[in-house]
Image (tube, rainbow, N blue to C red):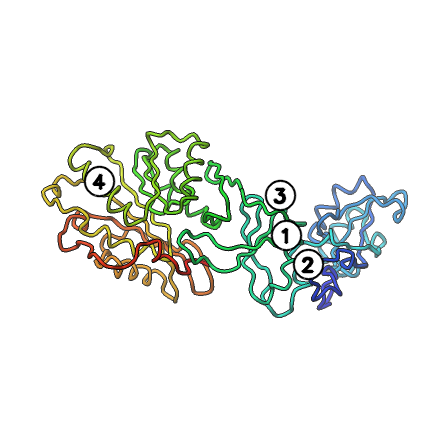
Amino acid sequence: MSTSSKSLLIPTGVRGMKSLDREKFNRKITAPVLKVSEDKLSKVTPICKAYFLKMSNFKPVQSSVAQCNENLNKCIYFDPDKVTNWTDITENIRTSLNQYDINEKNFDLFDITLTYDNFKFDTIFKAVLPENEEIVSSFSHIGHIIHLNLRDHLLEYRGLIGQVLLDKIKNCRTVVNKTYVIDNTYRNFSMEVIAGDEDFLVTVKENKCNFQFDFSKVYWNPRLCKEHERILEILKPRDVLFDVFCGVGPFAIPAAKKNCRVLANDLNPESYKWLNFNAKHNKIKTDNFKSFNMDGKDFIQEIFKDFILNVCKENDKVSDGAKIHITMNLPAIAVEFLKYFKGLIQEIELKDKFNLDIIVHVYCFTTGDNHQAIAKQLVNDNFGVDVSPHIVDIFAVRNVSPKKEMMRVSFRLTKEFIFNNNYIAEETNEPPCKIKCTRKTEE
């Protein structure tokens, strides 16, 4: 095997490039080649496939009459980082090849030129961006938009980074960089277009539903797709879903399509607009779906409260065996809204008529080592009640950054919490949520 410490398949001489010059990525290399006849090709290729030269826009098996003789008219190109001579090929593979009269006489070295089109974006970034520094390791793909969160040391390269991604990522038309973490009421963030069209209107398919929205004005995180799916698997037809911070509807709309009764709320008027747009275009039945443009506190203390009262007074009903689920996906501050469920209903005489199974799914960020314990403590501290006996699940949704996790705590909201006079949420002089939410909420 080759012992070279430098890969031959990485561009050279481009370190520090800030304005993309595709011609400078041309690199001539010497590639090992196995020359075979066409009639033996189907037998030989499975044997030596592990050594193939795998590059973008490059076929490892080619016809090359100019370099091969009339009988050996097929060339199998090997990876020069793995093979430099015949003996670099393992003995067992050489033995297998020999069964078809393929031996060292079939082995040759050809000069080829690799170009910008042959290199993947991550290989280009490794060659261009500063050594021993974090490079572009991940990004989000939302419709035709690639969304980055570049570190400060990469900002001077953002034009090149954007153009490379535009070239290399299929269906990408716009590359944006988040200029700072989310720090406003509506969880949308300031962004800079670093390559492509200034077009923020996207369409995303998730959980068999199509979502359209203006990415510059609403919140959407494709990394939460699996979590949306987990909650949808928990929901059963005829269950009731209260989505307190619903965004454009990734929980709400698939749930309504699943024949759940959905009451969805978001404070952001843009989210509310696109929520209704998406409900209509996904053909959601209006008798299954109601939308609200309210503060989360008011949604709990008015819409949710009225629903419970009406069920207890038999003016409304929940299907036999159905559950009520409450999703609270605003992880930086959702736990702060739990207190509004305490002592929500003062009509104690209705307590005996309460026979509902209510599960709250509240999301939070935790920093430390024991994320489950921290998440449970956050819920208990903000609720002001120990909900530990009623916890159904504590789940790590995704890693946000080193030692920081997004967690979900699912617990039962019992009649003791909702009706107990000792649990009445204290009135405070704190400003409304529209102002209170102006903090950094997610990375």
The amino acid beneath tag 2 is: Ile
Would you identify the image quadrant in which residue 263 lies?
top left
Q: Earlier in the sequence, mark 2 or mark 4?
A: 2
| Label 2–label 3 contact, CB within 8 A | no
Disc 2 element:
helix
Q: Earlier in the sequence, mark 2 or mark 1?
A: 2
Mark 3: few/some/many CA within 10 Å (<14, 14-19, 20+): few
What residue did someone put label 3 on? 171
What residue did someone put label 2 on? 124
Residue 100 locus on image (x, y percent): 79, 46
What residue did someone put label 1 on? 195
**Mark 2 or mark 1: which is in front?**
1
The amino acid beneath tag 4 is: Asp
Q: Real-space Cα distance between discs 1 and 4?
A: 49 Å
Q: Real-space Cα distance between discs 3 and 1?
A: 14 Å
Disc 3 element:
loop
Is 25 displayed left or right of 277 in the figure? right
Disc 4 element:
helix
**Mark 4 or mark 3: which is in front?**
4
Mark 1: few/some/many CA within 10 Å (<14, 14-19, 20+): many
Q: Earlier in the sequence, mark 1 or mark 4?
A: 1
Q: Earlier in the sequence, mark 3 or mark 1?
A: 3
What residue did someone put label 4 on? 306
Mark 4: few/some/many CA within 10 Å (<14, 14-19, 20+): some
Q: Earlier in the sequence, mark 4 or mark 3?
A: 3
The amino acid beneath tag 3 is: Asn
